[in-house]
Image (tube, rainbow, N blue to C red):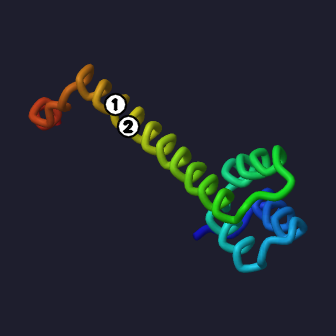
Amino acid sequence: MKPRTPKSIELYNKLLDRGYPREFCEQVSLNLNTDWTAQRMLGYLSHYRKLPMEEIADEMLAILSDRNRIMQKHELENTNAKWNQFMIQGFEDSSQNDEEE
């Protein structure tokens, strides 16, 4: 896993301040280790005073699922762009290059 970002550390401290066990705070912040995922969880937590750990874990999994879906969408868009470029240009004919030399 990547090292924690400043937002992830903020999330860790917020969970710790709310009285959750240190190990739980550690796992949540290690899994939500980007500014985007940590900010999503901080936004979720801002609507509640105290949540059961199960609900926080469930939200963490939902955030990670969203992130994976977005990453997959970007990967598919990139693949589609390359395919479209190939359809426009096709294979470069190496035999023409050999004849020119």
Q: CA distance from mark 1 to mark 2?
A: 6 Å
Between 68 and 44, the residue placed more toward the observer is 44
Direction from residue 16 to residue 24 in the image, left or right: left
Residue marked by disc 2: 76
Mark 1 touches mark 2? (CB < 8 Å): yes
Instruction: Give the percent coordinates (x, y) of residue 25.
Output: 74, 71
What's the amino acid at mark 2? Leu
Residue at the spot x=62%, y=65% of the render? 31
What's the amino acid at mark 1? Asn
The residue carrying pointer 1 sits among few (fewer than 14), some (14 to 19) or many (20 or more) residues within 10 Å by Cα, namely few
Instruction: Give the percent coordinates (x, y) of residue 57.
Output: 63, 61
Direction from residue 19 to residue 64 in the image, left or right: left
Residue at the spot x=51%, y=40% of the render? 70
Q: Secondary structure at mark 2?
A: helix
Q: Secondary structure at mark 1?
A: helix
Residue 93 sits in quarter: top left
Instruction: Give the percent coordinates (x, y) of residue 2.
Output: 62, 67
| Disc assigned to residue 80 | 1
Figure check: 48 above or below 91: below
Direction from residue 26 to residue 76 in the image, left or right: left
Between 56 and 66, the residue placed more toward the observer is 56
Instruction: Give the percent coordinates (x, y) of residue 79.
Output: 35, 36
